[in-house]
Amino acid sequence: MQGVTLYWLRQDLRLHDNPALCAALAHNQPVIVVYVLDESADWSPGGAQKWWLHHSLSALQTGLEKLNLKLTLKRGDSSQIIEKLAQQHNVTHVHWNRCYEPQAIARDTELKQKLQTQGVTVASHNSALLHEPWEISTKDGGPYKVFTPFWRKGCLPKGAPAQPLATPAGSYKTIDITSDDLDQWQLLPTTPNWSTGFNVWQPGEVGAQQRLTDFLENGLSGYKELRNRPDLPHVSRLSAHLHFGEISVADIWHQTEAYCAAHDVSNTDKDHFFSELGWREFSYHLLYHFPTLPTENWKSTFNDYPWADDEGWLQAWQRGQTGYPIVDAAMRELWTTGWMHNRTRMVVASFLIKHLRIHWKHGTAWFWDTLLDADLANNSASWQWVAGSGADASPYFRIFNPITQGEKFDPKGDYVRQWVPELAKLPNELLHKPWEAAPIDLLQAGVKLGETYPHPIVDHQTARNAALAGYEHIKKAR
């Protein structure tokens, strides 16, 4: 009886530069390509992610069909399903690309051992990172805890990643296995359909490549300075494509190098873009070495912080009704499009943690459910960075002023006017602080504070002082 190869898809929904897929096809055996929707995991996909997953799987299905491969969909316990498929179909080889979430590592380790005891050859591959987390270490062999030396001393000396693997071509043997119907998974919202604003995205490998091309042509030049402007297109918007593995970081690296070599793009802009890829690497490095990062303060001293955790304030933040225009614009952009600019992510996170003194866990939970690019490593490391409780953290006393942040990074008010249209007629000098407007200015702009737009739910200076008092509290508790 002929042997069969099984390729288990996870966060690698692409054909190009896919080492597990290429390795599976190289055995010259019939191939099972399976994706398992396992919602028993601690961090199963949130609502927005499910929308992206539906469309990404649909796009991948089309690509696989060109290779005469069928995408088999299964729902349930992933380990049990993979083991059962291996037993039922004389599987001799299993390949997957690695995941780095703590629960995924434990699951994969256990499954690999089970399959090997049954005589199955199992191989895992790196398709998501420039370097494996265990490949980067300090001089004493430990993990890095600060980003800059991690990137400059740990990663960059290793040089560029290997060239991307070619997209498979030709026709391959497959096995017709009973598959779930994607629509039956009901990943798309219906009643109500809150995803209508997501149509600005194109999930899938084709969309990822187009997104990279658009960024290289329209966003990379000037990236260092303009990446902080939410009103401008100078960010890559590749985060969701990267999270679902629709494009590899190595492919992004080499396409960027090639574009810069052929066009007048400064090394400064290129290097700053690469350093953003580096922060993603650092986040995975931290998650791998400190697996409690998503749930516990990395710095245990923050366990004593006197959080307020006011439910009304939390809901105002979630709905973009805080009375601070740059914060509200960002939260509404998130709800409408499933995405938020990196600068405003820092602003809204700082506001939640330091103005409202609400625990960062509430922020990570909201982002997990509403972000299309929700990623456990990035989400956890970045929220703890803002909180001051994480590795290489922003100092706790660095509290973003939402007024000056708006004035500096949305100087013409285009971003706020797009997402907070009830303030659109206010002049620029008042747009980020409408409570300072004279009654005549509010009247002319059609703004009624407390009715058409809320008063600030907290006073900036008062909130700042309360946050600093909390910091002094944990210092004394040490």
Image: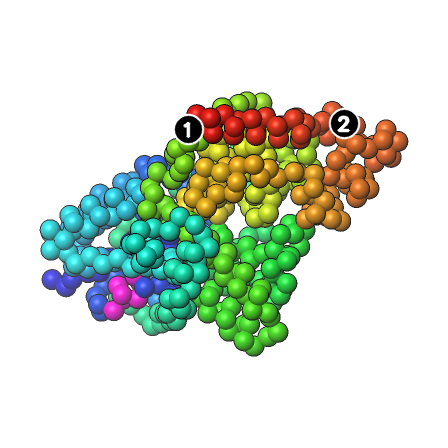
Q: Is residue 399 above or below residue 123?
A: above
Q: Position of residue 14 (x, y in %)?
A: 40, 60
Spatial separation of the CA atoms under disc 1 and disc 2 = 43 Å
Query: Looking at the image, what colour scheme do you see?
Result: rainbow
- Quarter of the image for residue 287 reads top left
- In the rendered structure, which segment of residues is drawn in magenta? 20-26
Q: Can residue 472 be seen here?
A: yes
Q: Can residue 56 be seen here?
A: no
Where is mark 1, residue-wise?
Answer: 478
Q: Is residue 276 above or below residue 475?
A: below
Q: Position of residue 73 (x, y in %)?
A: 33, 49
Mark sitting on residue 449? 2
From the viewer's perspective, tell me whether residue 349 is left or right of residue 132: right
For disc 1, the neighbor class at 10 Å (few under 14, some 14 to 19, many from 20) is few
Task: Work out whether residue 32 or residue 8 is closer to the camera in this orientation and state it.
Answer: 8
For disc 2, the neighbor class at 10 Å (few under 14, some 14 to 19, many from 20) is some
Residue 226 in the magenta stretch? The answer is no
Quarter placement of the C terminus: top left
Task: Provide the major secondary structure of the magenta segment.
Answer: helix
Chain-order first, disc 1 or disc 2: 2
Quarter placement of the N terminus: bottom left
From the viewer's perspective, tell me whether residue 111 is left or right of residue 218: left
